[in-house]
Each structure stands twice: as structure tokens, then as C-alpha cells.
Image: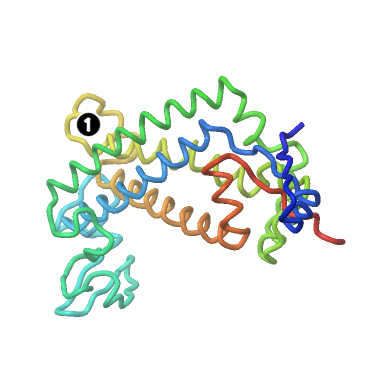
Amino acid sequence: MATQFAEGGAEGSAGRAEADASPLIYRTKLPVRIWHWVNALSIFVMLMSGMMIFNAHPRLYWGVYGANLDHPWLVISHRGTSGFVQIGGFEIATTGFLGYAQGVAYAFPPLVTIPSTYSLADARQWHFAFAWVLLISATLFMTYNFISGHLRRDLALKREERSLSHLWHDIKEHARLRFPTGEAARAYNPLQKIAYLGVLFVLIPVVILTGCTMSPTLNAAFPWLAELFGGRPSARSIHFLCAFGFALFIAVHLLAVVLAGPFNELRSIITGWYRLPKERSK
């Protein structure tokens, strides 16, 4: 049974009526909340410092070779004051956003980088410091997941949720902005579970391993890492794509929070308490 608040007092009848109709439950446990905020901070800092690191050589390659004379699959650059992104043979004008923005000719503008002024050395220090934070917090959280049963109980897809028809129904409901209500809102929905499992078991491990592959010291100690990803340039490309995956996840996550009710969602991830949305009328 979920714990509920008993709200009393002579005034606030509207609040009591809301509480009667939609109970306040303790949904998000403390370890999950701590990891959420530590993870959010780590990823934001690593994304912003990573963009500054990318500015030092704004090209990506596949294979074991990747330098100025090699053929890149992605370029973010400029011609004069015109910025562009080139993917293979396809080019997109990005002046004011990428390649050339805020009066500077960098792949990513100062507004979104750490530090805001060009410094590869400082960016690497920020990036590596928070990479350790991400690694340690992810290790502790995975340990908590297995010990507490959080992974099996809250994140694993139930049998009925694994069917394509169930997933397709969930996709259509989200596309219509019809989020779970009533008792269905107590647990993560299938799309949430898939997204969180993807972050936990795909994005975080791959971004850590590809980051290690780009380190000369670790590359020398564990040469199989470069072989695993098809070369250090390929590892850098995969690292970049994982970063893009994190950015996409954050954008969708924040949009869902706003659409589902930001106050209720923020209260849940800050205090643990969540008010179940009223059951939708059929």
C-alpha cells in the first residue's frame, strides 16, 4: 500500500477535495532521487565540456585513421561568417547556431560550452572530473538496483508490456499527450522503462568505454578497447553519437515533464511525493 498524506485544517477545502480524489503517494525513493540529480549535473557538465573538446577538431571519422587529410563523415565548420554542418555529402547551413555563431568561428558557440572561452586543457579537466562522478554514481546506482530489487520491480518490462501491440498503444497515447492517470500512474510506463534502461545499459556503459578508448594511457593498457570499437577515430564517433543520444533523451524528458505537469513531476523527483492524476473519464 502506498503511503498517503492526510490533509486537514479548516481552510483549503479545494485542496482537501483534490487530495480525496487524487492521493499523494511516496513514489520516488531517496537513492533514485540522489542519482537523478548527480547524473543530471554530470551529464550537463560533460556535454558542455565535451562540446569545447570537440571544437579543437570538429570532424569525425570511421576506422583506425582520423586526421585532417582523412575523409570525415561529419564536419561542423565555417566559410567566412557562414557556418555549416556536413554529413557525408550532404551539407546544411547552420549560421548562428553551429560553425559560426556569436561572432566566433567554432563548431559549438560559447553559450553552450564549458569553459565559454576556448581552452582545451580546461575543458578536459572539467570533462574528466565529471566522468569520474558519472562512473562512481552509475556503479553505486547499479549496485542499489540489484540489491534493492528496483531494477526488477520498477524498470523491467512486464510480460504484457513486451508485446508490440502494447508498445504501439503506449506510443499512440503519448503522441496524443494522454499520459497515465489514476493507478496506472503509480509505476513507470513502458516507454519510460525502455528509455531509462537504454540510458543505464547502453548509453552510460558505451560512453564510458569509448571515452576510455580515446585515452592514450588506457588505450596502451587495454588495446582490445580500440579493436572493440574499430579504432580510436570510430570510438570518438560513437562517443559523439552517445552524447547526441543523451541530449535527445534530456530534451524529450524535459518536454514530457512540462506536458505531464511540471510541479507534480518536480515534487516527485525532489521530495519523493507524487499526486496521482485523476482517473481519465472513459
**Residue 228 lies in quadrant:** top left
Instruction: Say which quadrant the C terminus sits in.
Output: bottom right
Residue 22 at x, y percent in the picture = 76, 50
Q: Secondary structure at mark 1?
A: helix
Q: Quadrant of the N terminus?
A: top right
Q: Amino acid at mark 1?
A: Asn
Q: Which residue is mark 1?
A: 219
> Which residue is at 25% across, 47% downward?
233
Q: Which residue, as the protein is rendered here, is positioned at the far front?
A: 10
Give coordinates of residue 242: x percent, y percent. Answer: 39, 48
- Kindly indicate the quadrant of the structure image that contains residue 136: top left
Choose between 207 and 109: the one closer to the eye: 109
User: Badge 1 local density, few (<14 within 10 Å), some, or many (20+)?
Assistant: some
| Above or below, 6 relative to 219 | below
Task: Compare residues 114 and 242 and report the one nearer the observer.
Answer: 114
User: Which residue lies at the image location 43% right of the left edge and 52% below the top edge?
Assistant: 245
